[in-house]
Image (cartoon, rainbow, N blue to C red):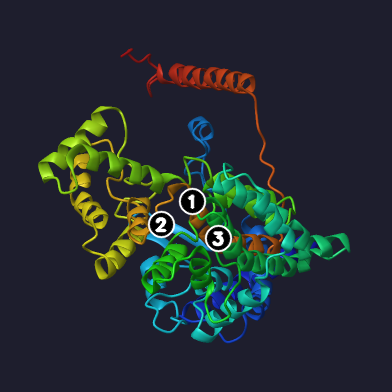
Amino acid sequence: MGRSLLKTRSRQVLKCGEYYWKLSSLRSYSDGGSLKEVLAKKIPQEREKMLGIKCLHGDKKLGVIKVSNVMGGQRGLLLLMCDTSYVDPNKGIFYRGIPLKEVCAKLPRTQKGSKEGTPEGAFFLLTAGKMPNKKQAKAVTTEWQKRGKLPDYCFKLLDSMDKRVHPMAQFCAASAALNPESKFVEAYNKGAKKPKYWEYIYEDSMNLCAFLPTVASVIYCNIFKGGKGNRKLDSSKDWSDNFCNMMGYKDSSFVDLMRLYLILHADHESGNVSAHTTQLVGSALSDPYLSFSAGMCGLAGPLHGLANQEVLVWLDKLVAAIGCEPSDEQILKFINDTLKSGRVVPGYGHAVLRQTDPRFSLQNAFAMKNCKDDPGVKLVTRLWKLIPKVLKELGKVANPYPNVDAHSGVLLQHYGMNEMKYYTVLFGVSRALGVLPQLIWARALGAPIERPKSFTTDFLCKFLSKSKKGTKGKKGKKGKKSRKNRKGKKSKKC
């Protein structure tokens, strides 16, 4: 009887959840209230919806796992739930169900004279699931300004580091070292109840986001500017403007580029290394500082966060070989020589996308408005027209079009940021806007610790051997039955 009542309740919950989703999808902008207030209203509804799904459909199958999937990095397997963003093969990335191009167009312009929305607005969207109005986006900016005073011990840590320590290593270390600031750890040690965990994760996430521009700018100035630079937040500036100002960049156009860059790189589902690592470590109830630091260690790897540097290195080789203004024929020859040598053309192709990455297109649109005569921008735009044709002719490339990394480097260099070793730190600051909302929601919905089962190669070989014998047995039985036709006579062998 108890189970029957639970299923009845689950069906009611699902209907309510569907109604709420339909109702909320009609509203393009969020209801009034602060980010935390919006979350507090939404979380109970989402909890009930997820409970309904689990109770009614927990035994449904999402697919089949093959040996090649396990041995191939689990690529493409439906194993993770992520509501903050998803990637459509033909339309690109969506933030909370909204195409990224539309997100960039609709985010409120809160700063006077700015042509771009703010990362603070994107954080609201990814966390609350609704586009903020101008007041709400501005409120996040104000909140981060209030929370942004970096503790002295973190300054001392960064200042004590040898300049040979990679910028990303310093970024990871500083993020983890902020662990004493964790409100979640404090509350957990005092016996906080599980349904309240999200509130403390939210506080930590807000504080961490507020600290990051100062952390990242100190790293930049210490390594590349001899320690010179402003370390104080300006209450009149937003998150991106303060970040740029503390690094020594005053150009309003560069600040707008930074706003765009930080929005575009914020989120990319939850299966990539940095996002999944953050969630995996967070599932053990590690605080956001430790979880984010772990994710950033993953981002530092050359297969994840160094792609735009590889593009710039390849472009430098191209220019060195055939000059700044080569002919199409010279470019095509250089591309073919790259491919014949067994290397790939960096910045082209994507694991999911089958069209030009909208993030590339958005950066190119920015370039056409602000620096279309820059040699690097002109070259990247020309390559966009030429490289896909070559890759299509190979017939082996699923996606011959440019991704986000094909453009970001030349834009940064146009404004004088030539320190390629630092680019992944920019990526890391941006990625906080996506992985931290995912962390908040994981705790809000009571996500359990991740614990997949592993097996040995010996087990796999034995399993495959048994599977092979079982298949032969089935074929043998079918064969015996087929030897007789309907009249009982033996059928002829093929």
Residue situated in front as seen by the camera: 335 or 170: 170
Residue situated in front as seen by the camera: 178 or 298: 178
Position of residue 348 measured from the top left corner of the image (x, y, whole percent) = 31, 46
Residue drawn 40% across the image and 46% down it:
309
Position of residue 493 measured from the top left corner of the image (x, y, whole percent) = 33, 12
Question: Residues at badges 1 and 2 in contact (C-beta under 8 Å)?
Answer: yes
Q: Earlier in the sequence, mark 1 or mark 3?
A: 3
How packed mark 3 is, by other alpha carbons closer than 10 Å (few <14, some 14-19, many 20 or more), is some
Kindly state the secondary structure of the residue where label 1 is placed.
helix
Mark 1: amino acid: Tyr
How packed mark 2 is, by other alpha carbons closer than 10 Å (few <14, some 14-19, many 20 or more), is some
Kindly state the secondary structure of the residue where label 3 is placed.
loop
The image quarter containing residue 457 is: top right
Residue drawn 74% across the image and 50% down it:
284
Residue situated in front as seen by the camera: 434 or 109: 109
Please give the residue where the numbered disc 2 appears in the rendered image: 417
Q: Does residue 438 appear left or right of residue 157 in this picture?
A: left
Query: Which quadrant is home to the C terminus?
Result: top left
Please give the residue where the numbered disc 3 appears in the rendered image: 228
Considering only vertical position in the picture, is 150 above or below 326? below
How packed mark 1 is, by other alpha carbons closer than 10 Å (few <14, some 14-19, many 20 or more), is many
The image quarter containing residue 39 is: bottom right
Q: CA distance from mark 1 to mark 3?
A: 16 Å
